[in-house]
Structures are given as structure tokens and as C-alpha cells.
Amino acid sequence: MNPRIKNVVYKKPYKLILSFTNGEQKEFNLFPYLSYPVYEILKDESFCSNVKIANGTIAWNNEIDFDPDTLYLESKPLKPLMYSETDSY
């Protein structure tokens, strides 16, 4: 099992800075997923920026979410502590 999400920060356009339970920070690009019907609503950046932590992953309105393994495996590593968990972008 891969680490789970402990914090998320939205970064324009369509990127997420993810902090994982193992201490890693990674950037996840949402753009390739926006063409899938379930994720089309995320094209609205005001909606997309309201991402929340839910059960070790991320979610919007407790209806749209991502598999936490996908988030971990497809994210690009960032330099340590590039973003504070209290930052918002």
C-alpha cells in the first residue's frame, strides 16, 4: 500500500501539491484527467480549488475523488518542504 494524502494545496492551473503520510511532497497534474466525464466539472477552477482531504485521498463535494495510489504513483516529486501545509495558491 502506498502512502496516503495528509494535505493538499491547489495550484493554478489544475495542479495539486500533495503531502503524503511518509513525508513526501509531490505535484499532481489534473489536466490529463479533465477529458473524462467524471472529472469534467473540475475544469471550473473555482470548484476545482475546493479540494479536500477525505479518507486518505482527495475529494470534491464528497462525490468526486481519486484513487490514492494513482495520486502517489503519478505525481512528480518536489524538493523537500517546497510548499508549507498552510500555504494556498
Image: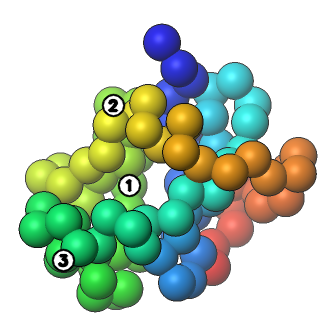
Q: Amino acid at mark 2?
A: Asn
Distance between the Cα atoms at labels 1 and 3? 15 Å
Q: Residue drawn 85% across and 59% down? A: 82
Work out whether residue 74 or residue 9 is closer to the camera in this orientation and state it. 74
Badge 3: residue crowd in 10 Å (few <14, some 14–19, many ≥20): some
Question: Marks 1 and 3: which is nearer the front?
Answer: 3
Q: Amino acid at mark 1?
A: Lys
Residue under pointer 1: 52
Residue 60's place in the image compared with 74, above or below, is below
Return the mark for residue 41. 3
Distance between the Cα atoms at labels 2 and 3? 21 Å
Quadrant housing residue 12: bottom right
Q: Amino acid at mark 3?
A: Ile
Q: Secondary structure at mark 3?
A: helix
Q: Is residue 85 visible in this depiction of the protein?
A: yes
Q: Does the residue at mark 1 contact the one at mark 2 (Cβ under 8 Å)? A: no
Quadrant housing residue 6: top right
